[in-house]
């Protein structure tokens, strides 16, 4: 497995904005967040226009925005703040996380009854989404997290029993629907397990790696709906339909999906155990020119932050150097976690 040394970290630190510099120093280089340099970077992060916009959505009880699941809701708000590198103990973020824990009565906002239905079916609904948000914030010990982690592991277990897509789904009115009783992982299963560690043993990680390898074999996976009475419900299949494609073969929106999924898989610890993923990550390293990701990959979804899309930490990509900094940082994260 290639190492983070393929990335020219010094050059990245020279050209990147405060979010990338802070996260590189703390997450990759191990610099204490309490260092004077990191404290200064935190001040710059809190001045970021997108961070200020999220701050402005905070309501008196700590909730961010008006919804739970949606582009301007608390899920997206917390995701933005953590991706931007805001410290976990910042008052705005701390209050938002406490409000999310207490907000059982608001988990339907922006998702409706679908959240409960998908949870009951083991396909990742409102409770799974909330747990994944806590995981991204580093709050693994919140109440109900253990139960959701166990549910996420069961979702990946189900993959090993699937010999084909036909075994888990069937045609229905021009679409595909899950067969009765089938569990299947959504992107929130993956986000939750990628952001937590208490469940990890060599045996469990190896078991997950076999499930992910099965996903590679089944790819591309069609969109599959949950049939609930006469309603078709789409589980969160964002970035979960093609585990076999290589970044070099993608463009636009598909490139966003690749970066998002592969970073999560690297954090999950399975890349060295799945030859197809290891090859994908190795080829990512080969695309770097003088330690930077210079290939022109761009799509509005990189900059459109919400519950799913959004990976650009630089303020805009009108300057190619900002796009290069962002994509180099994502490559750095993948290479670092894949080699850990």
Image: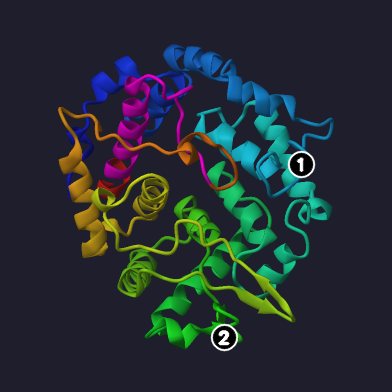
The residue range painted magenta reads: 309-335
In the picture, measured across the screen, residue 38 lies left or right of residue 117, that is left
Determine which quarter of the picture holds residue 150.
bottom right
Residue 91 visible in the shown view: no
Specify whether residue 93 is in view: yes
Mark 1 is surrounded, within 10 Å at the Cα level, by few (under 14), some (14 to 19) or many (20 or more) other residues, namely some
Residue plotted at (55% across, 27% down):
86
In the depicted view, which residue is nearer to us: 168 or 94? 168
Report the residue marked by disc 2. 179
Residue 279 in the image, given as x and y percentages of width and height: 19, 56
Residue that protrudes farthest toward the front in the picture = 174
Residue 151 x, y percent position in the rendering: 57, 69
Seen at 39% across and 22% down, the residue is 21
How much space separates mark 2 and mark 1, taking CA atoms? Answer: 36 Å
* Circle 2 or circle 1, nearest the eye: 2
> Compared to 312, does 71 lie above or below?
below
Query: Relative to 74, is 229 above or below?
Result: below
Name the residue located 41 percent from the left edge and 51 percent from the top edge: 257
Is residue 23 rendered magenta in the image?
Answer: no
Q: Looking at the image, is 199 positioned above or below residue 257? A: below
How packed mark 2 is, by other alpha carbons closer than 10 Å (few <14, some 14-19, many 20 or more), is some
Q: Residue 78's spot in the image, x, y percent? A: 62, 38
């Amino acid at each position: 497995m290639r190492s983070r040394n393929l990335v020219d970290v010094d050059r990245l630190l020279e050209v990147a904005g405060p979010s990338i510099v802070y996260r590189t120093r703390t997450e990759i280089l191990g610099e204490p967040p309490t260092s004077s340099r990191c404290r200064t970077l935190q001040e710059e992060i809190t001045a970021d226009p997108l961070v200020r916009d999220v701050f402005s959505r905070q309501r008196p009880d700590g909730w961010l925005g008006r919804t739970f699941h949606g582009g301007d809701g608390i899920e997206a708000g917390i995701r933005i703040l953590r991706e931007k590198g805001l410290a976990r103990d910042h008052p705005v973020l701390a209050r938002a996380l406490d409000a999310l824990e207490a907000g059982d009565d608001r988990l339907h906002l922006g998702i409706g009854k679908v959240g409960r239905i998908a949870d009951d079916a083991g396909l990742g609904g409102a409770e799974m989404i909330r747990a994944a948000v806590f995981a991204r914030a580093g709050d693994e010990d919140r109440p109900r997290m253990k139960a959701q982690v166990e549910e996420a592991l069961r979702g990946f277990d189900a993959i090993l029993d699937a010999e084909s897509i036909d075994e888990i789904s069937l045609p229905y009115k021009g679409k595909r629907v899950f067969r009765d009783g089938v569990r299947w992982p959504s992107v929130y299963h993956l986000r939750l397990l990628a952001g937590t560690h208490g469940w990890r043993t060599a045996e469990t990680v190896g078991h997950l790696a076999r499930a992910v390898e099965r996903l590679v074999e089944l790819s591309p996976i069609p969109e599959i709906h949950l049939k609930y009475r006469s309603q078709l419900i789409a589980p969160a299949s964002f970035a979960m339909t093609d585990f076999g494609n290589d970044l070099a073969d993608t463009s636009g929106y598909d490139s966003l999906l690749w970066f998002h999924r592969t970073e999560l898989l690297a954090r999950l610890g399975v890349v060295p155990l799945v030859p197809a993923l290891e090859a994908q990550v190795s080829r990512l390293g080969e695309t770097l020119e003088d330690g930077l990701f210079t290939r022109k990959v761009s799509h509005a979804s990189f900059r459109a932050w919400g519950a799913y899309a959004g990976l650009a930490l630089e303020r805009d990509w009108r300057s190619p150097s900002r796009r290069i900094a962002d994509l180099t940082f994502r490559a750095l994260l993948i290479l670092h976690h894949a080699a850990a």
